[in-house]
Image: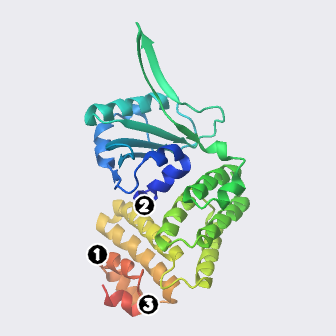
Amino acid sequence: MERRDHALFPEFMAFYFPSAHAEIDWQQAHVFLDQELAQIVQDAELGKRLVDRLVQVSTREAGEQWVYIHVEVQGQHDANFPERLFTYNYRLYDRYRRPVASLAVLADEGENWKPTHFGYQLFGCEVGIRFPTVKILDYADQAEALLADPNPFALVTAAHLFTRETKGDPEQRYRAKWRLAKLLYERNWDKQRIIDLFSVIDWLMRLPTELEKRLMDEVYTLERNVTMPYVTSAERFGIEKGLQQGLQQGLQQGLQQGEQQGMQKGEATLLQSQLARRFGTLSDAVRARLANATVEQLESWALNILDAKSLDEVFDQG
């Protein structure tokens, strides 16, 4: 789950942990406490985590409780994983003195690895933890059911499985990714949800550049056929993804040419590409304006693309 996972969190729980979902009072606000989690869990020796979440929720029966959600998205199992959850759990309890539920989703390829507990006994003293574990591979024979499931995390799970099945076969992966992309629009979800989910699918199902371009062209055509207004979800995704890549590219160039100059060049090149795709061939005057703009102007114009109906509006708003 990414930064916009606040809105998707109830569906995440409903899909992977339905029993826990049923015990939470979703009429009450749930609060993400990732910064506090980062302060509590700092030891490098505990290993790298791609996604860690700490969420405060209210139960249906009584009061509030802290729920710690650990989503591990990696291709190999970690022998220290159970001990890590145990460590996180007792540190969180030590800080908040509230019940803590540690939950795990595993996306590794070890069919026989599914840890559910950690503990030890000594001189009659027993210490440990048991935690619910969801294994992505357990859904391997449910592909069609996943694609028919209205929960967005069914598609995310399918994307994980398709990524594994199409390893080394880019054409097959292209077809699977295109199938998932089309399903996003068949659900009649709003733009931001499509962008968020497409971002996850895109991150999982990497394609060679040529196939990626073909896929995005198909998605652009699909969105135009369903007459989505102004900038499409695919274009918004492309702009957001491109801005991030442009910034990274600019920073890399900045190591050699000066940080500010590198950022400006990367963003100017990206923005020129986005404007050309949206409004057609650019004049020399527009290209010159981009080349001479400040980083702040470029960032402002890039955001204006999202709602501008013409090239003039991009610059008039900035």
Task: Answer left or right for 285 relative to 193.
Answer: left
Query: Do the numbered discs 2 and 1 sit on residues whose CB atoms are within 8 Å?
Result: no
User: Is 74 or 140 nearer to us in this picture?
Assistant: 140
Q: Residue sitting at 36 percent across and 48 percent down?
A: 57
Q: Alpha-carbon distance for marks 1 and 3?
A: 22 Å
Q: Residue sitting at 41 percent across and 54 percent down?
A: 26
Query: Do the numbered discs 3 and 2 sit on residues whose CB atoms are within 8 Å?
Result: no
Lower position in the chain sequence, tag 1 or tag 3 = 1
Would you place residue 93 above or below residue 38 in this image? Answer: above
Position in image of residue 69 (x %, y %): 43, 43
Residue for badge 2: 7
Lower position in the chain sequence, tag 2 or tag 1 = 2
- The amino acid on which the numbered mark 1 sits, given as a three-letter code, is Glu
| Element type at mark 2 | helix
Lower position in the chain sequence, tag 3 or tag 2 = 2
What kind of colouring is applied to the model shown?
rainbow
Position in image of residue 190 (x %, y %): 50, 73
Q: Residue furthest top?
A: 123
